[in-house]
Amino acid sequence: MIKKGLFLSSLALVLAACGTGNSDSNSSSEVVTTDGSAEQEEIVIKVASHLPPMTDIVEIAGEVIAEPYKVDLVEVSDNIQYNEALLNDEVDANFAQHKPFMEKFNTEREGNLVALQTIYNPVVGFYSPVYDTIEELEDGAEVAIPSDVSNEARALSILDHYEVITLDPEIDNHEATVEDITENPKNLTFTHIDLLNLTGAYEDGVELVFNYPTYIDSIGLKTEDAVLLEDDDEYTFALQLIAREDNQDSAEIQALLEAFTSQEVYDYLDELSKIGHLEPAFEPAK
């Protein structure tokens, strides 16, 4: 848990180092060159993100965005700062989350964040330092799942899909919690862990651990090492470009959206899809 004072201080340092994303920073003006012609100054669009490949995509979008726009990547160190920064107008957009996570933030913080476009779907799943297959799962095994509600639901939906547990059919699987488990034949025990600490749970020997490819890759594991992988053609949890209600239709954000859905970004994602980490979740702009 990040203490409020420490979070605000760290956020201030991050944003001070990268500048601010208020409306003044996005204003443009004309400058007169020595030959008397007018040139438009670049318009900076600040995008908060967290870890590759998300940050890589922001940078690729910055390389292809139309003039006079320029993308400034604001890197954050956790899953709190990028939404707080966007809500407080410190940045113009962020790219680090799926829509259910954003919706939960809006509910808790009375936010006005808006999901604009799915970009890619991370191939999430369960990993085990003990079992090679899910069939080896023993009675009473410990299962580490995310502590935030939207990712908890995602993890439980995978277990329900593979009939490891049964969720209440009257509950939307995208909102399910452990309280909605109606059948648990293996008597599994569930431990809620912050998303960023799930890799540590694997290293500590927890029998079954939910994780994202971005995080599990840090200890040399790939999606082929998972004992269960998500199967969701609807891309409910695909990562999206996020803006605010008040700026979503601006010229700056529309230019950013076009850059995020460019052929260059798609080609980068397509290469990553070949190793199983993710799936592109958009068709490139023509």
Image: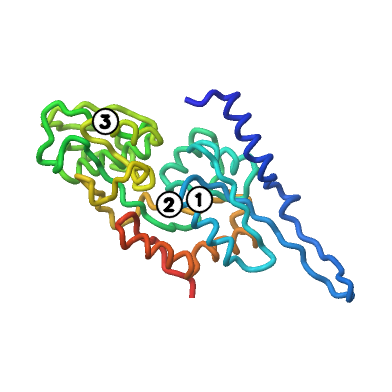
Query: Which residue, given by chain and number where applicable, does mark 2 sit on?
Result: 239
The amino acid at mark 3 is Val
Mark 1 touching mark 2, by CB under 8 A?
yes
Q: Secondary structure at mark 3?
A: helix
Could you say where residue 85 lies in the image, as x and y percent from the top left? 60, 40
Q: How is the image coloured?
A: rainbow
Could you say where residue 237 lies in the image, as x and y percent from the top left? 37, 49
Could you say where residue 226 lies in the image, as x and y percent from the top left? 23, 46
- Res 277 quadrant in image: bottom left
**Closer to the camera in the image, 256 or 275:** 275
The amino acid at mark 1 is Phe
Q: Which mark is residue 95?
A: 1
**Closer to the camera in the image, 57 or 259:** 57
The residue at the point 50 percent across, 68 percent down is 262
Q: Nearer the viewer, mark 1 or mark 3?
A: 1
Q: Which mark is residue 52?
A: none
**Closer to the camera in the image, 185 or 142:** 142
Q: Secondary structure at mark 2?
A: strand
Taking 35 as reference, is 247 above or below it?
above
The residue at the point 40 percent across, 57 percent down is 120
- Res 216 quadrant in image: top left
Q: Secondary structure at mark 1?
A: strand
Crowding at label 2, few (<14), some or many (≥20) Cα neighbours within 10 Å? many
- Quote the CA–CA distance across marks 3 and 2: 24 Å
Query: Which residue, given by chain and number where applicable, does mark 3 sit on?
Result: 178
The amino acid at mark 2 is Leu
